[in-house]
Image (spheres, rainbow, N blue to C red):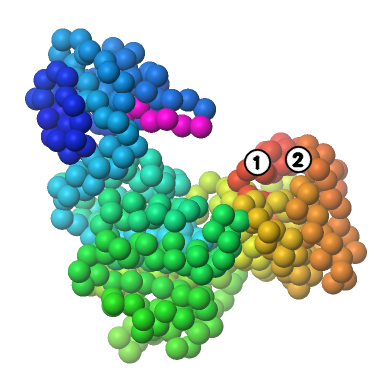
Amino acid sequence: MEKITTGEIAAAVGGKLRGSEEIIIERITTDSRNCATGDLFIGIEGERFNGNDFAESCLDCAAAVLTDRSISPPEGKCVIEVSDTKKALRDLAAYYRGKFTLTVVGVTGSVGKTSTKDMIASVLSQGFKTLKTQGNFNNEIGLPLTVFNLSSEHEAAVLEMGMNSFGEISRLTAIARPSIAVITNIGTAHIGKLKTQQNILKAKLEILEKLAPGGLVVLNGDDKILYSLKGKLPHSVIYYGIDNHMADVIASDIVLGNDKSRFKVEVGGESHSFVINEVGQHHIYNALAAIIIGLYLKMHTKDIEKGVAEFKTGNMRQSITRTGGITIIDDCYNASPSSMKAALKVLSQLGGANRTIAVLGDILEQGSYSEKAHREVGAAVAEFEIKRLITVGEDAKFIAKEAEKRGMTDSVSFSSNAEAAKYLAGEVKKGDTVLFKASRGMHFEEISDYLKKSLGE
C-alpha cells in the first residue's frame, strides 16, 4: 500500500476527524487481532462480532481507527467517525483505486470465477506486475482490502467479484473501475434468492456499469444465456468457446490426459498449442479468457503459453493427490450443478477403467430449484458411469434417486460427514479414484481429511 494521511481518508469518506490529519497510514485492516503501528483499523459489523466494539482498544496499537463510535483519541492517534463503516470502506477503496493508472480485469460469473481469475493473473504476470484477489476476497469487504494492496509498481490487477443479490457487483465495480470485464457463465448459484437465471444475468451484468470507455467484455460463447447478448451490448465483446463454432476464439484438438489438458487456438492465422498442468475441460475455458486478454494487451504468444502452463488450482479447488494407491480429487470448496457435472467428468476421465467413487453433498442456496438441481447431477452420475455414489445431506439424496432411476446400482446416503467418512475409509481400495464435491457449508474437507489420514498421509 502507498502511504496515505488521515486527512485524506477523512475527506474521502466524509468522516468527522478527531486528532491530527497528518498521521501517515501504511496499512488498512478490519481485523482487530493483528493491528500494528501505522495501521488504520476499520470497524465492521459482521455476523458474529462487531468490529466497532474493538475500535477503542485498537488505538493502543494502530495509528488511527475508523468507526461509528464517538471516541476521543489519545495524543498522537486519530479517530475518524462515520455513520456507516462498510460504506466508508468502499468509498476509501474507490478513492485509493483512483490514485493509479493500470489495467484492471474484473471477473464474475456463477462458476469458475476464482480459477479464471487465477489463470488470467498467471498469464498477465508474465508481462506485467500484477495484483490479484487472494483466495475468495470477492465481496464488499474483501475487494476493498485487495485494492488497498495496490502500489505504484503495479501495472495490472485481476479482481474477482462475487454476489448473492442485486446491487453487490454494482458497488464492487464502482470501486474497481475495470477496463476489461469477464463473465464466465450464468448458472444457478444463488438462484434461491434471485429466483431466475435472467435475474442472475442482470446481477452479473452490473460489472459493466463502470467499465472504462472503450473497455473490453470477454464472455463464454458456450453459455447460451451469455451468447444471447451477442450484438446487444454497447461495448467491444469477444466470445470464447469450445462447442460454439461461432465464437471469436475457439479451442480445438483438445486432449485431456491424467495430469494435463492440451488444446490449440488459432492466433493471427497460426495455430498455437497450449498445455494446462491441470485436468479438466473447464480449465480450458479459463485459459481461453486469459489468452484473449493477453492478446488484447499485446503480450507475446510464448509468454501467454507460459502463463497458462504455470497456472495452479487453489486449495480444495479440484486439487488432485495420490495416496496409498488412491487418486483423490479434492473439490470441496464450493459447488453448483454445472461445477458438479464438470467435476464428475474429470472423475470419469481420471478413473478410466478403474473404480470411480463420487462423494457428493448438498448444493446450497438453490431454493425451489433444489430438487431439479440435484437430479441434474444424478443424471450426470449415471451418464459418466460412476461406479459408486456416496451422498451426504437431505438434498443430495435426490442425486442418488435420479442416478438409481437411470440404472445406477451402487449408491448409499448418509446424514453426516462422520458417517460417510468412516464408511468410505473402509471401502476404498488401491486403484480407486475418489471425488469430493459439495457446497462450502457442508465442510466436506472433514471427509477428505479423514480418508487421507486413514491412508497414512
Relative height, residue 71 to residue 231 (above, below)? above
In what element is the residue under mark 1? loop
> Would residue 408 be found to the left or right of residue 278 on screen?
right
Residue 186 appearing in the image: no
> Would residue 298 be found to the left or right of residue 114 on screen?
left
Q: Can you give x and y, in whole percent of width and height, for residue 419 in the image?
A: 82, 39
Q: Can you give x and y, in whole percent of width and height, for residue 75 in the image?
A: 16, 10
- Tag 1–tag 2 contact (CB < 8 Å): yes
The C terminus sits in image quarter: top right
The residue depicted at 43 percent of the width and 84 percent of the height is: 247
Relative height, residue 83 to residue 242 (above, below)? above
Residue 237 appearing in the image: yes
Residues 34 and 82: in front is 82
Amino acid carrying mark 1 in the image: His
The residue depicted at 21 percent of the width and 37 percent of the height is: 13
Residue sitting farthest toward the top: 74
What residue does disc 1 label?
Answer: 443
Q: Which region is colored magenta? A: 42-47
Q: Quadrant of residue 73?
A: top left
In what element is the residue under mark 2? helix
Residues 53 and 420: in front is 53
Amino acid carrying mark 2 in the image: Asn
Upstream in the sequence, badge 1 or badge 2? 2
Magenta part, dominant SS: loop
Q: Can you give x and y, in whole percent of width and height, for residue 291 in the image?
A: 36, 71
Q: Can you give x and y, in whole percent of width and height, for residue 116 in the image?
A: 44, 61
What residue does disc 2 label?
Answer: 417
